[in-house]
Amino acid sequence: MVLLLKIKPTLIASPSILEDLTGLIDLETVLMLALKNNRDIKYAAINQKLAKERLKISYRRFLPELELGLKHNDSVVYGSPDSRVKQISIGLKQLIFDAGRYSSNLRMQKAETGSMSLIST
């Protein structure tokens, strides 16, 4: 009550204003609004979503990689044979064995992202 007196003496002068203010919102609602509008919590929730999406993307290392390439050289030199070269290349790479390093890293990342619990915004 002393704190209110120092800040706003007009609030104490009219008790009907205090009665109106106390009936508007309860403590749980105030806490939920504060947590919902907290910038740090929003950033943490966004970082958690990003970590989960990065985890999903990191599984692509187990899939085969297909490389397509096109190379051409059209330089013209007078008085010499034709130097135009066109090449097409196709490559396929597949991870076969990495001694379980990558899969253990994925398990650790999955455990870290699953252990985070934040208030959804």
Image (cartoon, rainbow, N blue to C red):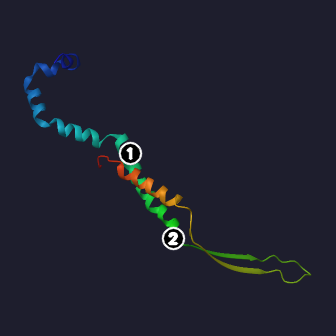
Quarter holding the N terminus?
Answer: top left
For residue 86, side relative to residue 59 (left or right): right
The type of residue carrying mark 1 is Ala
Q: CA distance from mark 2 to mark 1?
A: 31 Å
Which of labels 2 and 1 is toward the front? 2
Disc 2 secondary structure class? loop
Mark 1 crowd level (few <14, some 14–19, many ≥20, 10 Å Cα): some
Q: What is the x, y in percent for residue 59?
A: 47, 64
Q: Which residue is mark 2?
A: 63
The type of residue carrying mark 2 is Leu
For residue 81, side relative to residue 7 (left or right): right
First along the sequence among labels 2 and 1: 1
Q: What is the x, y in percent for residue 97?
A: 56, 66
Displayed quadrant of residue 36: top left
**Picture layout, residue 51 above or below residue 8:** below
Tell me which residue sits at (44%, 53%) in the image: 108
Displayed quadrant of residue 22: top left
- Between residue 78 and residue 72, name the one nearer to us: 72
Displayed quadrant of residue 37: top left
- Between residue 80 and residue 103, name the one nearer to us: 103
- Are dots 2 and 1 in contact, CB under 8 Å? no
Disc 1 secondary structure class? helix
Tell me which residue sits at (68%, 80%) in the image: 88
Mark seen at residue 96: none
Mark seen at residue 44: 1
Tell me which residue sits at (55%, 61%) in the image: 99
